[in-house]
Amino acid sequence: MRELAAERGPDDPDAQFELGGIYDSTGYEAEANAHYAAARELGLAGARLAQLNIQQGSTLRNLGRVDEAIAMLEATTPDPSIGDARAVFLALALRDAGRHDEALRLCIEALVPHLPRYQRSAANYAHALTEATD
C-alpha cells in the first residue's frame, strides 16, 4: 500500500487516508493517526471525510485520547456511507470516558428507527437515562 500511495504522491488526501486505514487495521494506530491527520489537512472531503472521522475517532480512542475522540465523533456530519457508525464509535468513547448512561442512550437512539414496534417507549427510556443532565 505504501508503494501505491507513493504513486499518488504525498499531497494526495485519498492516498493518505488509505494508508492510514492500512496502518489502522494492522494495529499501528500512531502511524494511522499521522496519515489520517495528513489526509484531513490536505482537504479530504465528502463521504471519505465522514469515514475518516469514524476511523480516526476510533484510533484516537485506542491511543487513549478519549476526549479528542469524543469531540471528533460528536462533530461528525451524518453521511450515508457511515450509517449509524458514528453512534457506535461515539458510544464506545463515551463508555471509556465513564459516561455509561450517555453511551447507552446513544445506542438505543440509534436502534429506535429500526424497531418495528415500541419506538416511542424505547426513545423515552433512552431519554430518561440522561434526563437529569439534559
Image (cartoon, grey):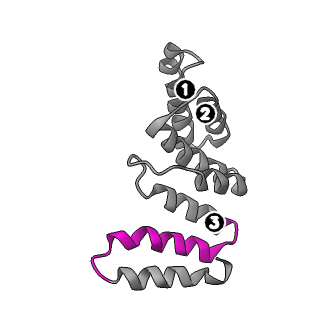
Whether tag 2 and tag 3 are in contact, CB under 8 A, the answer is no
Q: How crowded is mark 1: few (under 14 residues within 10 Å), some or many (20 or more)?
A: many
**Magenta extent:** 96-117
Whether tag 2 and tag 1 are in contact, CB under 8 A, the answer is yes
Q: What element carries label 3?
A: helix
Left or right: 47 with respect to 34? Answer: left
Which label was assigned to residue 42? Answer: none
Which label was assigned to residue 94? Answer: 3
**Residue 120 appears at what percent x and percent y?**
39, 82
Q: Is mark 1 on a helix, strand or loop?
A: helix
Which label was assigned to residue 13? Answer: 1
The Cα–Cα distance between marks 2 and 3, rounded to whole angstroms, is: 23 Å
Q: Residue at x 53, y 75 (%)?
A: 105
**Residue 19 appears at what percent x and percent y?**
54, 30
Residue 31 vs 58, above or below: the answer is above
Whether residue 111 appears in magenta in the rendering, the answer is: yes
Disc 2: which residue? 40
